[in-house]
Amino acid sequence: MAANPHPNAHPAAGAYSNGAQIAAQLEARAAALLPAAVSVVRHHAMLLETAIKANASGRPGPNAPTGDYRRSWTHELQVTAAGVEAVVGTAKPQAGRLEYGFVGPDIIGRVFHQPPYPHVGPAVERVAPLFLAAMGRIAEVGR
């Protein structure tokens, strides 16, 4: 047993280190965690996109007479230094109006009283608990 070099240590206390083992375990866990996180994020981004598209297929969501708006929803996945992220969205300008409604004049003076047709919020509420549970399961692996 090595003497503890700390000045406030009890004379009978020893110094032990398993730092190398802990570092090896953390490295192994990190190596397994990233692919699992990518898989979970990708899967739930696709679930969210699908749920939004389903909600945008008629009442209580917006009507989709041509399907153009519904088809415009996509998802992109990125692995960054901060982690894994997915963006689910559309570039269609009517998305905000459809989700939240619109009352008042537009840029060219037409007056609207358009009610909201929520389709994104309900999809997020449905998918978010599934996503959090899945991320919790991969965080538990190896504990």
Image (cartoon, grey):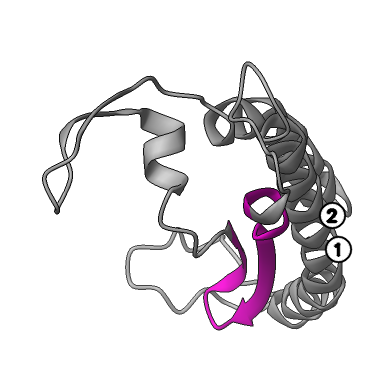
Above or below 86: residue 2: below
Q: In the image, what residue occupies the spot 77% across and 79% down?
A: 27
Q: Which residue is mark 1?
A: 39
Q: Amino acid at mark 2?
A: His
Query: Left or right: 54 with respect to 52?
Result: right
What range is drawn magenta here?
69-88
Who is closer to the viewer here, 122 or 5?
Answer: 122
Q: Residue at x 18, y 40 (%)?
A: 110
Q: Residue at x 72, y 44 (%)?
A: 48
Mark 2 is surrounded, within 10 Å at the Cα level, by few (under 14), some (14 to 19) or many (20 or more) other residues, namely few
- Residue 116 is one of the magenta-drawn residues: no
Q: Please provide percent x and percent y for residue 104.
A: 15, 30
Residue 122 shown left or right of residue 38 in the figure? left
Q: Nearer the viewer, residue 108 or 74?
A: 108
Percent coordinates x, y for residue 140 in the rendering: 81, 45
Marks 1 and 2, Cα distance to the nearest angstrom? 6 Å
Answer few, some or many: residues within 10 Å of disc 1's Cα (few below 14, many 20 plus, some between 14 and 19): few
Left or right of 3, for residue 68: right
**Labelled pair 1, 2 in contact (Cβ < 8 Å):** yes
Residue at image location 71% in from the left, 48% down from the top:
66
Determine which quarter of the picture holds residue 74. bottom right
108 vs 58, nearest the viewer: 108
- Say which residue label 2 marks: 43
Badge 1 amino acid: Ser
How many numbered discs? 2
On the image, which quarter does residue 72 sit in? bottom right
Q: Callout 1: helix, strand or loop?
A: helix
